[in-house]
Image: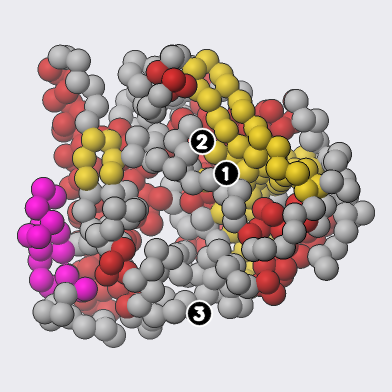
């Protein structure tokens, strides 16, 4: 993390006009009829011009402080860390809008910066976003959000990327949150009203790890049922607001207890090298109720677009079959504490492109924090794949 940077961080500001019936993001850029995007471009000082750029984007996070983008730039590769209009606040995030934002960066990289090749690096939640974007760039089908609002990706003229690196990435935010929803919650307005049978963090829960397969099956079914219950409530309330027609068009709500997975306290379930009783946000029992928990705050439309198990259009297994021509590299971190071991094989199987590879890095955690050896292995894999696929000139210096 403290390695000297041999590159310059150049700010990116992109703006484009967009008309919305109500403000979706707070502030000047969100309320005056245009969208503003902010990012960073990493330009190696010894190699300021290149044909290829690696573009990192996550729906809601900013990735410029991750170890990997800086490590790529330090070996002479050009990098863009792109933030969506919903950066660091996904409470109102619409995945279809994020797809439009990613399109603005890809177009800018090629038409303004002059890069011939743009490779999407889909880290964590950016993996399914990259597949979602590429599927709509190759074969656009979406004209509306799940809430019925216009968002015509068929007319957006999205520029296809030239390659995708799916790294430390899960199926989608919708499927992942479903596997993490606390199924013990019976009343969404009262998180203290819980079903003891599924309250696995409670010392009074009758089911203890290692959990038997039948309990896990019922636990998973209850998680899906809770997601569907929230989805139905969101749909009904949106319908009520439309019928009222009194100026209230959207509403925010809290989703309680969203970091609850049997895998985190039972390492025998879908085993990998992860630490027991640990998740990427720390101790699972604490993360389950923390304000920074996944999907803690949401709007009705955002839930349907991003978190709904049935209605989200950005699910990886929906997008992957529409990615038919693009080379894809999947890098799996064997000790990943955020991405379930079951997810990457499902993506690999669903990808329509015949040009796909999946490689596992033993011992690697989600962020490679303090893991120089695993990070360098990841960079070497990415660089070797890029050269073999004709996406990167072979003269770029190797990892030291």
Magenta segment, which residues?
184-201
Q: Cα distance, mark 3 to mark 1? A: 26 Å
Report the residue at 20% width, 15% height from top. 247
The residue nearer to you, when weighing 319 against 77, is 77
- Residue 265 % position (x, y): 32, 78
Count of all numbered marks drawn on residues in the image: 3
> Is residue 182 among the parts visible in the rendering?
yes
> In terms of sequence position, does the residue under pointer 3 or pointer 2 come before the other?
2
Give the labeled residue for mark 1. Answer: 57
Report the residue at 71% width, 70% height from top. 377
Answer with left or right where residue 143 lies relative to residue 195: right
Q: Secondary structure at mark 1?
A: strand
> Is residue 391 among the parts visible in the rendering?
no
> In terms of sequence position, does the residue under pointer 2 or pointer 1 come before the other?
1
Frontmost of labels 3 and 2 is: 2
Give the labeled residue for mark 3. Answer: 273
């Amino acid at each position: 993390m403290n390695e000297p940077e041999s590159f310059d961080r150049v700010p990116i500001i992109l703006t484009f006009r967009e008309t919305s019936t109500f403000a979706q993001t707070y502030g000047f850029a969100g309320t005056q009829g245009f969208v503003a995007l902010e990012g960073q471009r990493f330009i190696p000082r010894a190699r300021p011009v290149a044909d290829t750029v690696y573009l990192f984007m996550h729906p809601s996070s900013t990735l410029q402080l991750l170890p990997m983008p800086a490590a790529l730039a330090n070996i002479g590769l050009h990098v863009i860390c792109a933030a969506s209009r919903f950066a660091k606040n996904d409470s109102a995030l619409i995945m279809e809008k994020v797809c439009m934002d990613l399109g603005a960066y890809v177009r800018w990289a090629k038409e303004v910066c002059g890069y011939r090749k743009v490779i999407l690096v889909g880290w964590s939640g950016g993996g399914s976003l990259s597949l979602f974007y590429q599927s709509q760039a190759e074969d656009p089908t979406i004209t509306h959000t799940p809430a019925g609002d216009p968002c015509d990706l068929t007319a957006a003229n999205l520029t296809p990327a030239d390659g995708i690196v799916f790294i430390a990435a899960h199926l989608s935010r919708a499927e992942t949150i479903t596997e993490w929803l606390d199924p013990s919650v019976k009343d969404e307005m009262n998180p203290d009203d819980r079903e003891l049978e599924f309250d696995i963090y409670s010392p009074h829960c009758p089911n203890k790890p290692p959990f038997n397969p039948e309990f896990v099956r019922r636990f998973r079914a209850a998680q899906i049922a809770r997601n569907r219950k929230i989805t139905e409530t969101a749909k009904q309330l949106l319908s009520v607001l439309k019928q009222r027609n009194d100026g209230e068009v959207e509403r925010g709500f809290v989703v309680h207890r969203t970091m609850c997975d049997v895998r985190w306290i039972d390492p025998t379930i879908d085993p990998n090298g992860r630490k027991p009783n640990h998740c990427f946000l720390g101790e699972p029992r604490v993360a389950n109720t923390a304000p920074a928990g996944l999907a803690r705050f949401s709007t009705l439309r955002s839930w349907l677009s991003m978190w709904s198990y049935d209605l989200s259009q950005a699910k990886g297994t929906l997008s992957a079959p529409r990615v038919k021509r693009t080379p894809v590299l999947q890098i799996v971190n064997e000790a990943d504490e955020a991405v379930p071991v079951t997810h990457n094989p499902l993506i690999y199987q669903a990808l329509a492109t015949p040009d796909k590879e999946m490689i596992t890095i033993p011992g690697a955690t989600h962020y490679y924090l303090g893991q120089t050896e695993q990070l360098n292995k990841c960079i070497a894999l990415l660089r070797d794949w890029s050269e073999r696929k004709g996406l990167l000139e072979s003269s770029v210096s190797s990892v030291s």
